């Protein structure tokens, strides 16, 4: 089960992770809906690009720009959070959405906890695979922890002070000069 578009749904994708003995060039990618590591995608590009249902995941130390020429191919791109305190995945997600224009499913995988979901959603994630040792129903509640945001991000282009009308004054930035 995963959280997708603010609901708990069945996950019909397999996330392929390599073990220490497997190499990106030689690993056998199973059939069906599979999300492969970026290294596997790059190593087996010619064979994998022929598949209709293929996704890719990026490690926190990889660049979204590596997918620039193939971004339209993927219906799922995942970003791995190796540990709760590693925030590089937020930048990867933002770059995929805002700079590269990725419009498909953007999924957070790895050490994903409730406390992160609201902020992950703000940078463009729309699907989440919370840690299996946590209740997914509790994680879902993390998407609604806050009713308002102050800062700009992918989901809100204007800061709060530009969106709020103060008594007697038009909202900042909307004054005719």
Image (spheres, rainbow, N blue to C red):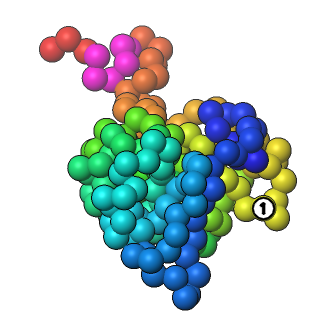
Which sits in the foreground, 71 or 92? 71
Residue corresponding to mark 1: 132
Quick check: 61 left or right of 176? right
Which sits in the foreground, 157 or 71? 71
The image quadrant that residue 158 belongs to is top left
Please provide percent x and percent y for residue 157.
37, 32
Please provide percent x and percent y for residue 136.
79, 49
Residue most toward the left? 177
Vertical side of 130 occupied by 17: above or below: below
Vertical side of 172 occupied by 137: above or below: below
Residue most toward the bottom? 21
Query: Residue at horizontal 36%, vertical 13%?
Result: 170
Vertical side of 88 occupied by 11: above or below: above
Which sits in the foreground, 130 or 22? 22
Is-magenta flag for residue 155? no
Q: Main secondary structure of the magenta part?
A: loop
Mark 1 neighbour class, 10 Å CA radius: few under 14, some 14 to 19, many 20 or more: few
Please provide percent x and percent y for residue 140.
74, 42
Query: Residue at horizontal 39%, vertical 76%?
Result: 25
Specify start and end residues of the magenta stretch as a single range: 169-174
Please provide percent x and percent y for residue 60.
45, 68
Quarter the C terminus occupies: top left
- Label total for image: 1
Asked if residue 89 shows in the view, the reply is no
Asked if residue 9 shows in the view, the reply is yes
Query: Residue at horizontal 57%, vertical 54%?
Result: 31
């Amino acid at each position: 089960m995963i959280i997708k578009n603010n609901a708990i749904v069945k996950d019909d994708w397999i996330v392929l992770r390599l073990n220490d003995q497997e190499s990106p060039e030689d690993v056998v990618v199973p059939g069906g809906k599979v999300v492969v590591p970026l290294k596997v995608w790059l190593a087996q590009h010619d064979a994998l690009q022929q598949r209709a249902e293929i996704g890719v995941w990026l490690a926190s130390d990889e660049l979204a720009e590596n997918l620039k020429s193939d971004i339209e191919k993927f219906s799922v791109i995942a970003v791995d959070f190796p540990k709760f305190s590693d925030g590089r995945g937020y930048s990867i997600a933002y770059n995929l959405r805002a700079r590269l224009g990725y419009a498909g499913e953007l999924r957070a995988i790895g050490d994903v906890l409730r406390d992160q979901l609201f902020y992950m959603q703000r940078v463009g994630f729309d699907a989440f695979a919370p840690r299996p040792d946590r209740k997914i129903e509790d994680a879902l509640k993390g998407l609604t922890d806050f009713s308002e945001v102050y800062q700009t991000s992918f989901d809100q282009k204007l800061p709060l002070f530009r969106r709020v009308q103060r008594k007697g004054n038009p909202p900042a930035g909307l004054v005719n000069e």
